[in-house]
């Protein structure tokens, strides 16, 4: 099973700042990585797939990069609605599909 | 627009079987393009994939849960279902139903989720 590790666990930033979230895989997952956003009391929402392709309707301030074992989700200029928990998920080696433990992006 | 809606008991006793159904609206579960699945999230914790099923009945399961999980599809009702047997308190979670494109690995969309508590 591929283990996904996200860092940091919590990121405290102010609106307008740039956010950089990291995700590491225990072995190469090529570009088979997705990112999700989850707000309190809501289901996760797909943001990025293929490591760097934005899902339909996702604002351009969200971008993904990386391949192999190291991945990054960048939010270029934080809006108030971006404060949430973010999860990465690999789909290169399955079953099982596996998720990171999440990064909480909170308002500083 | 495709929508997924989970339904089922919110409380299950230890050692019993948890049963949930996901109703698909705005699209056909019999489409050859998609797998349908379940993901769970214990309160305050992360996400765990449970399994996925094709309309034909072909299914994949998380090895950690495989011995206790059964997925099924009812194409006449446009629904798919989850059964998790021998539950314990550790199975308490929000359960989400999801769609996955055939040949792809990400999940979109997700149902709103339903909390199932295992307690006597």
Image (cartoon, rainbow, N blue to C red):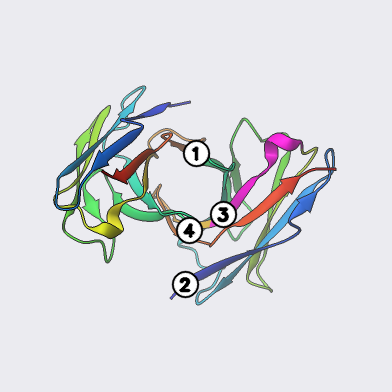
Give above or below for B87 relative to B111.
Answer: above
Residue in the image at 69% along x and 51% along y: B116
Residues A7 and B84: in front is A7
Residue of label 2: B2
Q: Determine whether, in the image, residue B75 is placed left or right of residue B48.
A: right
Residue annotated with mark 3 = B96
State the separation of the CA atoms marked 1 and 4: 13 Å
Dots 1, 3 in contact, CB < 8 A: no
Q: Does mark 2 fall on the same chain as mark 4? A: no
Q: Choose the circle earlier in sequence order: 2 or 1.
A: 2
- Mark 4: give few (<14), some (14-19) or many (20+) Cα within 10 Å: few
Residue linked to disc 4: A42
Image point 28% across, 54% down: which residue? Answer: A82
| Whether labels 1 and 3 share one chain | yes
Q: CA distance from mark 3 to mark 2?
A: 15 Å
Residue at mark 1 to residue at mark 3: CA–CA distance: 12 Å
On screen, residue B104 versus residue B81, left or right, reads left
Relative to A72, is B42 on the left or the right?
A: right
Label for residue B46? Answer: 1
Seen in the picture, residue B20 relative to A105 is either above or below; the reply is below
Kindly identify which chain the residue marked by label 3 belongs to: B
Check chain identity for marks 3 and 2: say if they share one. Answer: yes
The chain that hosts pointer 1 is B
Range of residues picked out in magenta = B88-97
Number of residues whose C-alpha sits closer than 10 Å to that of mark 1, classed few (under 14), some (14–19) or many (20 or more): some
As helix, strand or loop, the secondary structure at mark 1 comes to loop
* Place of residue A11 in the rendered image (x, y in percent of width and height, measured from the top left): 28, 37
């Amino acid at each position: 099973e591929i283990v996904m590790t996200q860092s940091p666990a919590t990121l405290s930033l102010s609106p307008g700042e740039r956010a950089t979230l990291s995700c590491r895989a225990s072995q190469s997952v090529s570009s088979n990585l997705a990112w999700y956003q989850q707000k309190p009391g809501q289901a996760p929402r797909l943001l990025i797939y293929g490591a760097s392709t934005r899902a339909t309707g996702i604002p351009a301030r969200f971008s993904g990069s990386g391949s192999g074992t190291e991945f990054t989700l960048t939010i270029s200029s934080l809006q108030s609605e971006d404060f949430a928990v973010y999860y990465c998920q690999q789909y290169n080696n399955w079953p099982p599909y596996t998720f990171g433990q999440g990064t909480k992006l909170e308002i500083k | 627009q495709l929508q997924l809606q989970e339904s089922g008991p919110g409380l299950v006793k230890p050692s019993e079987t948890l049963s949930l159904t996901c109703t698909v609206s705005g699209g056909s579960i019999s489409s050859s393009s998609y797998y349908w699945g379940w993901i769970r999230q214990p309160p305050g914790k992360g996400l765990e994939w449970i399994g996925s099923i094709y309309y034909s009945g072909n299914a994949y399961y998380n090895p950690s849960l495989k011995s206790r999980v059964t997925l099924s599809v009812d194409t006449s009702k446009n629904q798919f279902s989850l059964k998790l047997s021998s539950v314990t308190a550790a199975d308490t979670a929000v359960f989400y139903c999801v769609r996955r494109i055939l040949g792809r690995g990400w999940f979109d969309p997700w149902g709103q989720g339903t909390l199932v508590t295992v307690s006597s």
